[in-house]
Image (cartoon, rainbow, N blue to C red):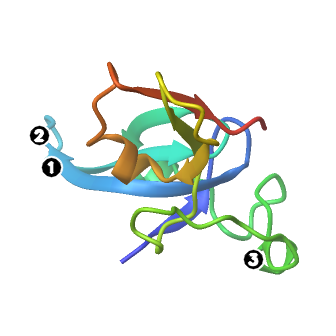
Amino acid sequence: MLDLTSCPECRAPAEITDRFTLASTDGPVAHVAVSCLGGHHLRMPADKLPSPGSPAAPSRLALLPHRFQLCVRCQVNPAGFWVSARDSSVVRRPWCLSCCQHLDLAACHVTPFAP
């Protein structure tokens, strides 16, 4: 299931790509990996994510009018990268971060969407 939030750096729509726990002297601390459409990739404590009601974070209603391209490979996640073959004249296609991680970068050209 797609888990969306806003980027702590630029407030662009972001996907929580991983959840994990790290040990600390005060006990285990929940962490998340976040990747946004602006190209930021962060690992941080889960409690440091922007809250939906914070003034700097966009509200859910503010995101509704916007349209997001879906990944052409999985057709589920919002796309954040343009992908095209290096030795082909094929037009670039929108892909999500999850699907881009499985690409052969020697054969493909991957470009993040402009913020």
Q: Residues within 10 Å of mark 2 (few under 14, many from 20)?
A: few
User: 76 above or below 6?
Assistant: below
- Residue 14 percent location from the top left of the image: 58, 54
Determine which quarter of the picture holds residue 8.
Answer: top right
Q: Earlier in the sequence, mark 1 or mark 3?
A: 1
Disc 2 residue type? Ala
Q: Write down the residue under mark 1.
A: 28
- Residue 62 percent location from the top left of the image: 86, 72
Q: Write down the residue under mark 3.
A: 60
Q: Nearer the viewer, residue 47 or 61?
A: 61
Disc 3 residue type? Arg
The residue located at (20%, 51%) in the rendering is 20
Q: CA distance from mark 1 to mark 3?
A: 30 Å
- Residue 94 percent location from the top left of the image: 59, 52
Q: CA distance from mark 2 to mark 3?
A: 33 Å
Q: Write down the residue under mark 2.
A: 23
In this image, 3 relative to 5: left or right? left
Q: Residues within 10 Å of mark 1 (few under 14, many from 20)?
A: few
Q: Nearer the viewer, residue 69 or 3?
A: 69
Determine which quarter of the picture holds residue 105.
Answer: top left
Determine which quarter of the picture holds residue 115.
Answer: top right
* For the residues bearing labels 2 and 1, Cβ distance under 8 angstroms: yes
Disc 1 residue type? Pro
* For the residues bearing labels 2 and 3, Cβ distance under 8 angstroms: no
